[in-house]
Amino acid sequence: MNNEQEKPTKGIIVVDKPLHLTSMNVCSIVRGRLKAGGAPKRIKVGHGGTLDPLATGVLVVMIGKATKMCDEVMAGVKGYLTTVDLSQISTTDDLEGEKTSVIPETIPTLEDVQAACQKWTGDVMQAPPAYSAIKVNGKRAYALARKGEKVVLDARPIRIDSIKVVEYQWPMLTIDVVCGKGTYIRSLGRDIGSEFGAGGMLTALRRTRVGRFTLGDAIPLDDVPNPFDPATVEMM
């Protein structure tokens, strides 16, 4: 019996996902480096919690037998630092979509913004963005939206533990969010702005935490060894 059969690869690495790559792009790159290091061609590599291409930060990458921990990892509390342009909306609720200017009759004060954030804290109902991976009649919502079809997703219960205003100078708002599974930060930016008739388009999003894993645990994708010896993969 070879070593690969005696000790199946099982481990977790935390990657600081760079801009423009999808979460699956990152998994594919890690898988390629593991295969270059001698791992089986069919080695499993997955992630806990998708990050959009325009988002950066903590991406928990599970390797081999550790992919069975996906539900456990995704159930953990998430932390995000995001900047929202309150003077615009977009079809995707971020910079990727078609933009429209939205200027309220009265520019919201810091107190207005804090009150809106407070309203969206706790157990709330949130409508996911049309450009999301949620399935509608067996098809991904984003696929339907890209075809020009109207996509309206039902609101669902989520938990937002806290929303802290880090910086606010109209129209830009930066908030620190701690939330549970299933929360869409793009929707949150939109919803906060709607409280005072403004826009809400994300211009930056960085995940700072997934459960017990934080940015302090994360390494740049370029620092993942290439080739990546599967024997060095460990549980964190």
Image (cartoon, rainbow, N blue to C red):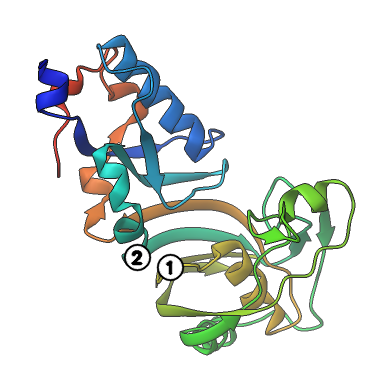
Residue at 28% from the left image edge and 48% from the top image edge: 215
Decide: marks 1, 2 in contact (CB < 8 A)? Answer: yes
Residue 88: % across, % down: 75, 62
* Above or below, 7 relative to 65: above
Q: Amino acid at mark 1?
A: Lys
Corner quadrant of residue 87: bottom right
Secondary-structure class at tag 1: loop
Residues 156 and 223: in front is 156
Judged left or right of residue 49, residue 96 is right
Q: Residues within 10 Å of mark 2 (few under 14, many from 20)?
A: some
Residues 82 and 2: in front is 2
Residue 142: % across, % down: 73, 51
Residue at 44% from the left image edge and 51% from the top image edge: 206
Judged left or right of residue 144, residue 52 is left
Residue at 81% from the left image edge and 52% from the top image edge: 144
First in sequence: mark 1 or mark 2? 2
Residue 69: % across, % down: 28, 52
Residue 127: % across, % down: 66, 74
- Can the viewer see residue 150 in this picture? yes
Residue on which disc 2 sits: 75
Residue 181: which numbered mark, if any?
A: 1
